[in-house]
Image (spheres, rainbow, N blue to C red):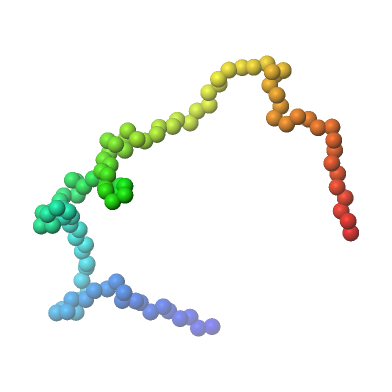
Amino acid sequence: MRLVRRQPTFGRTYIDDKTNQPVAVEREVSYQSAEDITASVDKDDLVKAYRYGKTLVPFNKVDEEQMSVHNDKCLSILGFAKSSEVRPPHPPTTHTAAGARRR
């Protein structure tokens, strides 16, 4: 049996043209205003929005807190009843069904 070692891939390696050395790639993200493309916007000033038809409806943290549903898991007793007043979910049957299989 012969073991084969997998060859390294160079898919994520970037090499500088001048020095032929690996270079780390840094990602830079910037946001621009829709009205004025030259104006940059800070990430803190961005607001989550949902599309409703062709319009965008802003939805900030205050709206999200007001719209959230707070359900606490609990079991509460509403009242008591006599056992004679409670109907069983399925009435008891007197019929017994049996089946036979043909060969």
Q: Is residue 54 above or below residue 81?
A: below
Number of numbered tags placed on the structure image: 0
Looking at the rendered image, the quarter that the C terminus falls into is bottom right
User: Where residue 98 sits: x, y (%)?
Assistant: 86, 44
Which sits in the foreground, 24 or 36?
A: 36
Q: Residue at x 17, y 54 (%)?
A: 34
**Residue 91 location, quadrant:** top right
Front-most of 97 and 4? 97
Where does the image place residue 78, in percent across and percent down from the top left?
55, 20
The image shows residue 23 at horizontal and vertical percentages of 20, 71
Give the residue displayed 40% in from the left and 32% down from the top: 70
Seen at 31% across and 47% down, the residue is 52
Of 83 and 72, which appears nearest the observer?
83
Work out which quarter of the rendered image holds the N terminus and state it. bottom right
Q: Residue at x 35, y 77 (%)?
A: 8
Find residue 20 and report its image quarter.
Answer: bottom left
In the foreground, 93 or 83: 93
Left or right: 6 in relation to 78: left
Q: Find residue 11 and report its horizontal and vertical position in percent.
A: 31, 74
Considering only vertical position in the picture, is 37 above or below 90?
below
41, above or below 90, in the image? below
Q: Quadrant of residue 67?
A: top left
Task: Pick out the residue farthest to the front.
Answer: 53
Q: Residue furthest left?
A: 38
Question: Residue lying furthest bottom in this view?
Answer: 2
